[in-house]
């Protein structure tokens, strides 16, 4: 009888890894045969590879966990789903079903929310560019608009002129909360007095009433106390506005930035250790509110969490299409998904799981995507056993930002499916075809041809 | 440069390079390839050896032998 075949390996023994049969990392690997009970095999044979898969159960569980953390500590809490994190209709619809309003940062996102059925009054409109037309539309539909910069004051005053009555808006602040990098390019700086200057200008115009404050201190914030500092500064500023100008602040929007269990490149500790539970964040934030709010004053608290809610609900299945040995001895794989789909791979190192048990010892390997571009690396080095062509790799968490920042570049974008609570699988975005790429293009009549005829090609320089 | 004949190899797949003092580990399929190469066999002969002893298709075996040779190269053994 023939022996079972295991791919040949030849590995240099380093001290520390000497025990071949111990629990060395050379044998550790992660296997995933299904997502929410639906086998990887079935998903790929039905919907192809690569494939984005979202878990509705995870999404709803995360939402409820986070909402409960805040809602049980403070009376008026509303979540605004950060559209840019993932604006697939099905995903937004789940968020809205769970009770979230919409947080948008462009006219396109605003229109998307409206088309999905969200009323203007349930939309928070942020961002550095709101065209006068978009502003006018959003304000007249009752959206909560947060001022980003001085120039917007003029645009909003023009709306007030047209209406003949004051317009209510919030203003976006940026500030030092002790974290780096400090996001200082959006909104008005609190520490320098810039925000107060804007308030004075607004008050003197008499056409705008300020009823809210907004701030988003950054993304992937590991230190919960940064939010406590943010809240303290916002509340103090709110009372300055009330006492000095008579503006009553009805909402404090503290933005998003809560970290998902993804691993930032260069981060030493595993995310399970580095990241505090959401209850810690909720505790710090609400504690700061109670400490600084005046008795009986409970402005509405908005949160615009993106990645925390959705990142872990998203997976990308990709298949190994080729194996190659690099000149430096590392093994490399070509996968059918690259940075065109995993935009966040520039910053995050994903968990990689295999769809099957594989014999053989782990080796450091690089995973490239399918693009004919040097930048197309989705994993710079992980210990993987020798993988056959066709092996599927499951990357996670990839639910946040990838399915909005993915690129239409070189390859078609694949199917996106949602696994429902009862295990049903629905396509929520169809795989693209050439029409998706071409349909907005216009080929001038004079450039059309039936068959390629190169015999008349000019040989001289172009005149 | 082929230094494979200098290597000390035991049946367990432990490989010692007396020139550099480095040691390596290989598995049964790797051992078959290594012994084939030491006996100056061609890759296609080694494919046959692998297919005779193990449950594997010639195409897969050939691919793996090529890769194995690349690894030996990176360790400057051939
Ligand atoms: C204004 C605003 N709110 C919310 C978010 C969501 O952030 P996160 O996904 O880090 O929670 C962002 C992201 O950049 C943002 O700019």
Image (tube, coloured by chain):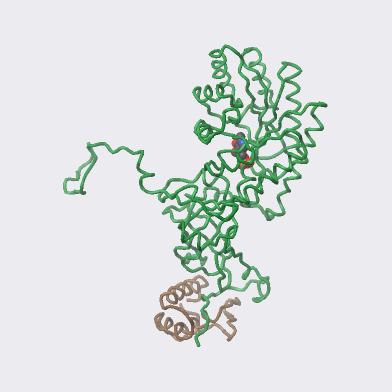
Percent of width and height locating residue A170: 64, 25
Give residue A393's position: percent from left, percent from top: 53, 61
For chain B, what colour was chosen? brown
The structure residue drawn at horizontal position 43% and vertical position 52%, both measured from the top left corner, is A373
Q: Is residue A326 above or below residue A272?
A: below
Where residue A283 appears, as percent x and y from the top left, is: 78, 41
Q: State which quadrant residue A240 falls in.
A: top right
Q: Position of residue A19 (x, y in %)?
A: 67, 75
Name above or below for residue A411 compared with residue A97: below
Q: Nearer the viewer, residue A152 or A26?
A: A152
- Name the residue nearer the viewer: A458 or A300: A300
Letter of the chain in green:
A
Residue at the farthest bottom position: A1
Tell me if residue A367 comes above or below residue B62 in the rendering.
above
Q: How many numbered discs?
A: 0
**In terms of image quadrants, where is residue A215?**
top right
Q: Nearer the viewer, residue A182 or A98?
A: A98
Image: B25 above or below A79: below
């Amino acid at each position: 009888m023939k022996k079972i075949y295991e791919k040949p390996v030849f590995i240099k023994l380093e001290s520390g890894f000497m025990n071949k049969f111990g629990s060395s990392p050379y044998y550790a690997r992660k296997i995933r045969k299904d997502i929410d009970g639906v086998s990887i095999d079935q998903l790929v044979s039905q919907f192809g590879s690569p494939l984005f898969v979202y878990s509705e159960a995870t999404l709803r569980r995360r939402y409820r966990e986070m909402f409960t953390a805040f809602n049980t500590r403070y009376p008026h809490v509303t979540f605004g789903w950060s559209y840019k994190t993932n604006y697939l209709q099905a995903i937004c619809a789940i968020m809205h079903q769970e009770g979230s309003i919409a947080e948008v940062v462009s006219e396109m996102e605003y229109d998307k929310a409206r088309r999905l059925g969200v009323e203007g009054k349930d939309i928070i409109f942020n961002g550095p560019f709101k065209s006068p037309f978009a502003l006018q539309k959003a304000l007249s539909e009752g959206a909560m608009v947060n001022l980003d910069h001085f120039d917007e004051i003029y645009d909003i005053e023009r709306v007030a002129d047209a209406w003949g009555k004051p317009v209510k808006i919030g203003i976006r602040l940026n500030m030092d909360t002790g974290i780096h990098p400090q996001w200082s390019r959006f909104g008005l700086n609190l520490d320098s007095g810039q925000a107060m200057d804007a308030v004075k200008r607004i008050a003197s115009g008499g056409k705008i009433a300020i009823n809210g404050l907004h701030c988003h201190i950054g993304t992937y914030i590991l230190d919960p106390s940064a939010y406590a500092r943010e809240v303290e500064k916002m509340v103090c500023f709110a009372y300055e506005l009330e006492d000095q100008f008579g503006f009553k602040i009805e909402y404090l929007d503290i933005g998003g930035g809560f970290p998902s269990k993804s691993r930032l490149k260069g981060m030493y500790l595993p995310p399970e250790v580095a990241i505090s539970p959401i209850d810690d964040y909720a505790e710090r934030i609400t504690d700061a509110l109670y400490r600084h709010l005046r008795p009986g004053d409970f402005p509405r608290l908005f949160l615009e969490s993106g990645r925390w809610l959705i990142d872990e609900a998203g997976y990308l299945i990709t298949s190994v299409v080729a194996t190659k040995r690099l000149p430096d001895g590392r093994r490399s794989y070509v996968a059918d998904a690259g940075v065109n789909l995993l935009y966040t791979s520039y910053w995050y190192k994903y968990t990689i799981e295999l769809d099957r048990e594989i014999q053989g010892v782990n080796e450091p390997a690089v995973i490239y995507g399918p693009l004919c571009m040097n930048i197309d690396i989705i994993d710079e080095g992980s210990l993987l056993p020798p993988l056959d062509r066709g092996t599927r790799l499951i990357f996670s968490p990839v639910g946040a930002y990838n399915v909005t920042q993915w690129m239409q570049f070189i390859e078609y974008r694949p199917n996106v499916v949602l696994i429902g609570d009862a295990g049903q699988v629905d396509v929520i975005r169809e795989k693209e075809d050439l029409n998706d790429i071409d349909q907005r293009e216009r080929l001038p009549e004079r450039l059309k041809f039936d068959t390629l005829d190169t015999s008349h090609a000019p040989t001289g320089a172009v005149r | 440069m082929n230094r494979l004949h200098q290597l000390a190899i035991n049946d367990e797949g432990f490989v010692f390079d007396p020139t550099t003092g480095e040691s390596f580990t290989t598995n049964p399929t790797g051992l078959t390839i290594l012994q084939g190469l030491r006996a100056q066999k061609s890759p296609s002969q080694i494919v046959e050896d692998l297919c005779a002893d193990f449950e594997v298709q010639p195409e897969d075996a050939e691919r793996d032998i090529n890769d194995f040779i690349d690894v030996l190269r990176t360790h400057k053994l051939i």
